[in-house]
Image (spheres, helix red, strand yellow):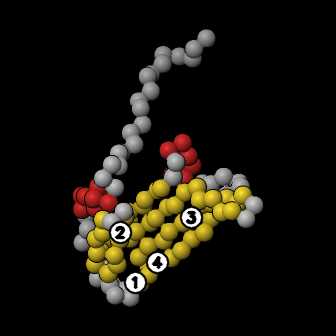
């Protein structure tokens, strides 16, 4: 069996690498929520765009994590990470199409190549 997941990171650009590396800041707390289904499907909706994902089985199909900090009694959300298990029948290209559908203006982050140096600079 192939286990496929799609992980969505919602965080400010300047801090995304912290969350991508599975870290958080010392002042932050994390709250996790498990999302299960008992109808062999779930509805995923983002900004009015939705799709019904047929899981073909009941059980836990998603986990959301909110990374937040407290300012007095005020809770400030810094990041939300959503891990969605995908049905075995969905391949990588279908997951990419689904992500493009939900997040129309998303861009792939590409690291810039560094120039090779012959030796240490002096």
Q: Which residue is mark 4?
A: 35
Percent of width and height locating residue 87: 30, 73
Where in the figure is residue 3, as x and y percent of width and height? 36, 70
- 10 and 26: which is toward the camera: 10
Q: Label 2, on which residue?
A: 45
Marks 3/2: CA–CA distance: 18 Å
Helix, strand or loop status at disc 4: strand
- Packing grade of label 1 (10 A; few <14, some 14-19, many >=20) is some
Task: Say which element carries label 1.
Answer: strand
Image depth: mark 2 or mark 1 in front: 2
Q: Residue at x 44, y 66 (%)?
A: 83
**Percent x, y for residue 42?**
34, 78
Viewer-side label of 3, 2 = 2
Residue 98 drawn at (x, y percent): 28, 61
Q: Of marks 3 and 2, which one's residue comes earlier in the chain?
A: 2
Vertical order, 109 against 104 (above or below)? above
Give the Cα distance between marks 1 and 4. Answer: 7 Å
Distance, label 4 to label 2, CA atoms, is 14 Å
Name above or below for residue 107 compared with residue 59.
Answer: above
User: Dot 2, crowdedness within 10 Å: few (<14), some or many (≥20)?
Assistant: few
Q: Earlier in the sequence, mark 3 or mark 4?
A: 4
Image point 52% across, 61% down: which residue?
80
- CB atoms at circles 1 and 4 under 8 Å apart? yes
- Rounded to the nearest whole Å, what is the CA distance between mark 3 and mark 4? 14 Å
Disc nearest the viewer among 4 and 2? 2
Sequence-wise first label, 2 or 1:
1
Q: In this view of the protein, can residue 29 be seen by the observer?
A: no
- What residue is at 73 percent from the left and 65 percent from the top? 73
Q: Which mark is residue 37?
A: 1
Q: Are marks 3 and 4 in contact (CB under 8 Å)?
A: no
Q: Secondary structure at mark 3?
A: strand
Which numbered disc covers residue 66? 3
């Amino acid at each position: 069996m192939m286990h496929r997941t799609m992980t969505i990171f919602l965080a400010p650009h300047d801090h995304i690498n912290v969350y991508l590396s599975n870290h958080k800041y010392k002042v932050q707390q994390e709250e996790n929520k498990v999302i299960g289904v008992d109808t062999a499907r779930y509805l995923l909706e983002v900004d009015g765009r939705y799709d019904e994902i047929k899981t073909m089985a009941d059980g836990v199909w998603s986990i959301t994590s909110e990374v937040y900090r407290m300012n007095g009694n005020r809770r400030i959300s810094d990041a939300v990470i959503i891990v969605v298990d995908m049905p075995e029948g969905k391949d990588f290209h279908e997951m990419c199409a689904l992500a493009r559908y939900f997040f129309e203006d998303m861009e792939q982050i590409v690291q810039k190549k560094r120039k090779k140096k012959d030796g240490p600079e002096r």
